[in-house]
Amino acid sequence: MSEGRIKRMKELPSTHLLGTGTAMCSGCGGLEAVHQIYDVLGEKTVFVNAAGCMTLLSVYPFTPFRGSWLYTAMASAPAGAQGVRDALDILIEQERLPASENLDVVVLTGDGSAYGMGMSATSGALDRNLDFLYICYDNEGYGNTGQQSSSATPHAAATSTSHNYAGYKKDLFAIWAAHDPSYVATVIGSEPLDLARKIEKAKELRGPRMILALSPCPTGWDYDPKDSVEVGKLAVKTGIWPLKEYVDGEVVHTRIPRERLPVRDYLRLQGRFAHLFQPQENTALIDAIQARVDRYWDNLV
Amino acid sequence: MQPSLLTGNAAAAWGARLARVDYVPAFPITPQTEIIETIAGWVESGDLAARMVTLESEHSMITAAGAAAATGVRVFSATSSQGLLHAMEMLYTVAGWRAPFVLVNVSRGLSAPITLEADHNDIMAARDSGFLQIHCADCQEVLDSVLIAYRLAEDPDIRLPVLVNLDGFYLSFTREPVALPAAELVQTFLPPFDARNIRFSASAPQSQAVAVLGGGPYSYFRYECHLAALNGVALYQQVAEEFAGLFGRDRCAVEDYRAQDAEIVFYMVGSFATKAREAVDRLREAGQPVGLVRPRLLRPFPAAPIAALLAGKQAVIVIDQNLSVGQGGVLHTELTCSLYGRPDAPPIVCSFIGGLGGRDISAQEFYQMVAVARDAVDAGVAPPPRLLYTAEELRETRKLQAIAMAEQVETAPSPQEQGDE
């Protein structure tokens, strides 16, 4: 096992595998993460996609992937991964396929499927200890249909179905960890070293492994596409998006912001939170969001 | 080989075993569960070298089945009723993938009201999905049809999944003598699955089931599916002939039971056709030239052999064990549509709905349907569609309603209480 092989930024893969010219929005934080993930995973992969923004990566007759791809449906990508994994195992066992032709099976899903419709199929795959990697690009809403609220939407966000979302973002990391899989990690494209190390680790493990990537979304979150990296960095620095991993029954935080920036720095950049600042500052609500973040980090100690 | 006494479910499982399937994604549902339990037992004992996995729903089960078939292994699965409908999105999807595998459906009426007993609304709901459909009338036919279904599904000119249908309870739990074909003969009839270009592998990356933009490519791929399915009419006939040569049983696309010289024929699918055969024999004894025409193959629709068998008949009695609400029987609709405009088409095509939710169709009713058809022939006018129901059944249902109403009266608030509110 070569855990921790990537230690410095300059050790990140220099060959970029995912093709350009896809139909994703400019500044897509999900695509930013998938680019980096794919560079580490490599082309001996089959991506099993659930309905979402990234369905549009492969539109006949084009694909940005050097490896394989299977589009399934919104609810059952992990079951598609099950079928492909089992079939590859059978073919290799029966010596109808040389082991060198084996592929890593990777589910690619947005938060709409991961946090909601696809959860039953995901939980089932975890029960069965399916050997697969599960990548969720989480842009905190049904992005492909115009950013309606999903159960990944954060408290107070404006979406196209809520002016001020009353719910709280579901803790998908904890739901996965409760299944005790091989690996769970949160990542973000604006922290490429942390991301690459986690993908590298996930790649070495077998069994169910999830990468949950917060995916700043200029279209759905309403900010200038050039600010995607900045929004991502602030998500980490304010403590809103904790970078962590679950392995061997323990949760380890991989990046602990010693002095957290106030959440308002993160919120203020995004149009979806503009109503917290205009026409006048909603101090109570901002403080409530801050208190929730503080409580999370305080409880860690 | 001596015939064994097998249920329809066991016959389906034997079909999968003799087909040497590689992979069985499963999910339990009555009245199908015995199929996957039987297979699970063989997988555990080593009698069947397959991998079996229980999914958490039929939607996932069909996804896994399609994905495995799209990776190049031979796949078998089974479901019923609500399960088939829960998987409906994926039925269309995996047919669009051109994933060849066999799915057995054990027909059962659909909710609501919820029931366990047989009718064909479940399988009819899947008729436009791209799955081919073979309908069975007895347990032997179930086993035989599973083998034939693999030949159809895996043929390079077809490459579509196939549904094999049997009736819940009437076949699923009824033991009949079933001859188990010799494994070596089945090897000859059904060689190992040659997946050719259907695969995922490191050195030959593939994108399957990608999105399309616009109606041009979408229509193209849907038409391709349709044209491939239509190839199935001729191929089915060829495969059935081969099957008859090897195993000595006629499994042609359309069963003709004493129909050649008949004036009036029953037209139906499924196990109740065995009751129709019995009625035909009794009516023949009474001097009435009656017969039966029963499609085994329903998708693709074998329009030409059906029309040929019905040509020149005085009347056809279509018995639908399904109900398209607001329209009527699905078989009746499809048959009249395919006969329309043919010069020798029967002038009278009567529609009867019967056998919903496991309701029996009695011998008396078969005789009565012939009487209705004969009157229609004499009058020269097709009768209105009929929903089979006896006075006795209505009385029994009225009794249940009376009990339900009595409960309602006892528990309802009195007029005064209502007034207080």
Image (cartoon, coloured by chain):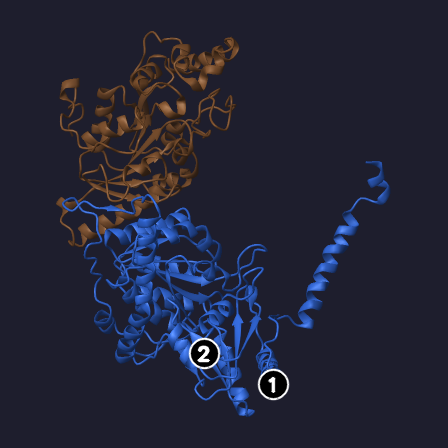
Chain colours: A brown, B blue
The quarter in which the N terminus of chain A is drawn is top left
Report whether B107 appears left or right of B390.
left
Residue B118, percent from left and from top: 51, 64
Q: From the viewer's perspective, is residue B154 above or below residue A214?
A: below
The residue sitting at the right extreme is B416
Question: What's under tag 2, amino acid-wise?
Answer: Val
Residue B303, percent from left and from top: 40, 72
Camera-nearest residue between B50 and A242: A242
Note whether residue B22 is visible: yes
Identify the residue at horizontal 24%, vertical 32% (top origin). A21
Check disc 2 and report its element: helix, strand or loop. strand
Q: Which mark is residue B378?
A: 1
- Pointer 1 and pointer 2: residues touching (CB < 8 Å)? no
Identify the residue at horizontal 35%, vertical 69% (top origin). B145
Q: From the viewer's perspective, is residue B45 above or below residue B56?
A: below
Camera-nearest residue between B28 and B74: B74
Question: What's under tag 1, amino acid-wise?
Answer: Asp
Let me know if marks 1 and 2 both belong to one chain. yes
Camera-nearest residue between B94 and B157: B157
- The local crowd at label 2, few if under 14, some if 14 to 19, many if 20 or more residues have their Cα within 10 Å, is many
Report whether B417 appears left or right of B58.
right
Residue B323, percent from left and from top: 55, 63
Report whether A83 appears left or right of B310.
left
Residue B178, percent from left and from top: 37, 75
Q: Chain of mark 1?
A: B
Return the residue at label 2. Answer: B293
